[in-house]
Image: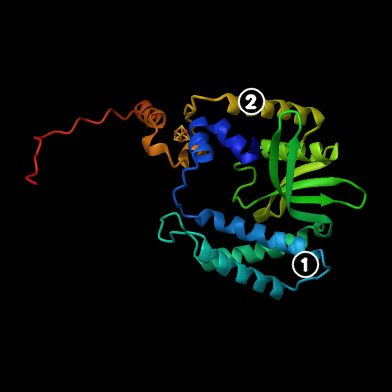
Amino acid sequence: MRLSYSAYKMYVDCPRRYHWVRLKKVPSVKSSKYFALYGITVQRFFEYYVNKYVKKGISLTDVQIRSILRQDWEKILDTEYVIWDDPWCKQSSEEIFESIYEDVLSNTKEFDFFKHARSEVIYNIFLKKSQDELHGRLDFVITYPDGTVEILDGKGSTKVEKHVDNEQLYFYALLYLLRNKKLPNKIGFWYYKFQKIQYLDFNMDTIVEFKKKFALVKKSIKEETQWLPKVKITKACKFCDFKADCDAFLLTKEANRIKRGHSVPNPAEGKMVSFGF
Ligand code: SF4
């Protein structure tokens, strides 16, 4: 079995969804990527910046950064599906681009770890005993000259600590541990919009506890036969492509509606009309 953090998380959030997405491979419904545009573009810029330019000792002027971003932005707009007419699309494409440009510049000026970093680092760890493979793609791994190591996950969110999922970083620390026989010194979320890195407190006990939980989930996936839905008032259901025919979700939604004081809808009144065709 090959397991990434996103697969683990999907199963923990809802086995039914895992079943359809990961096992049955039902293609996902095309949805607007408006909210993801910022994060995708900034992340891609820093991937090139670290792996291509800084690595080769090439320093970029603000004008060159703008030009690189502009070229990539056009490509991203061509490939990502966005419904600009949606009521929650408050910013135009140009406004988003300008905020990306400003934030990229601020981040390049704020931090000085780039020359020690690698971006989009892939870890595939084969576990001999279980014959399983753990897979992860780490946004940034920074190895300082004194040997200390940091793992960072980039976030394009508009609020610090919004949607924070500490286990994601524990998983990366576990991958690092399994490969290097030691823990990274620091793990943290890098919030592009705020030029801020939020480090997590962790130690070997934290990662061992997470490893145990991960092993249990892995076992559970292997032995699973029911794939029962697990309704959560989180984005797991909100962004689930299978909610329209998910009885568990619809029942919970109705129960919550009633709890909020809304009565059961009246049955339709009037006569049945038959169409003559
Ligand atoms: S709507 Fe929620 S409970 Fe139903 S399958 Fe999707 S994630 Fe699971």
Identify the residue at image location x=41%, y=28%.
248
Image quarter of residue 243: top left
**Could you tell me which residue is drawn at 80 percent across and 46 percent down?**
150
- Residue visible at 85% across and 36% down? 181
Amino acid type at circle 1 is: Tyr
Relative horizontal placement of residue 266, taking residue 232 as reference (left or right)? left
Q: Secondary structure at mark 1?
A: helix
Q: Is residue 231 above or below residue 142?
A: above
Q: Position of residue 105 (x, y in %)?
A: 70, 65
Any part of residue 105 in sight: yes
Q: Which numbered disc flags the more N-terminal residue, 2 or 1?
A: 1
Q: Residues within 10 Å of mark 2 (few under 14, many from 20)?
A: few
Q: Position of residue 115 (x, y in %)?
A: 83, 60
The residue beneath circle 1 is 53
In the rendered image, residue 134, in percent from the top left (x then y), is placed at 70, 38
Horizontally, is 238 left or right of 271 in the view?
right
Query: Split into 4 quadrants, where in the image is the N terminus?
Result: top right
Distance of mark 2 from mark 1, alpha carbons? 43 Å
On screen, residue 227 above or below 176: above
- Residue 219 is labelled as 2
The residue lying furthest to the left in this view is 276
Label 2's element? helix
Q: Could you tell me if the residues under marks 2 and 1 are in contact, i.e. CB atoms within 8 Å?
A: no
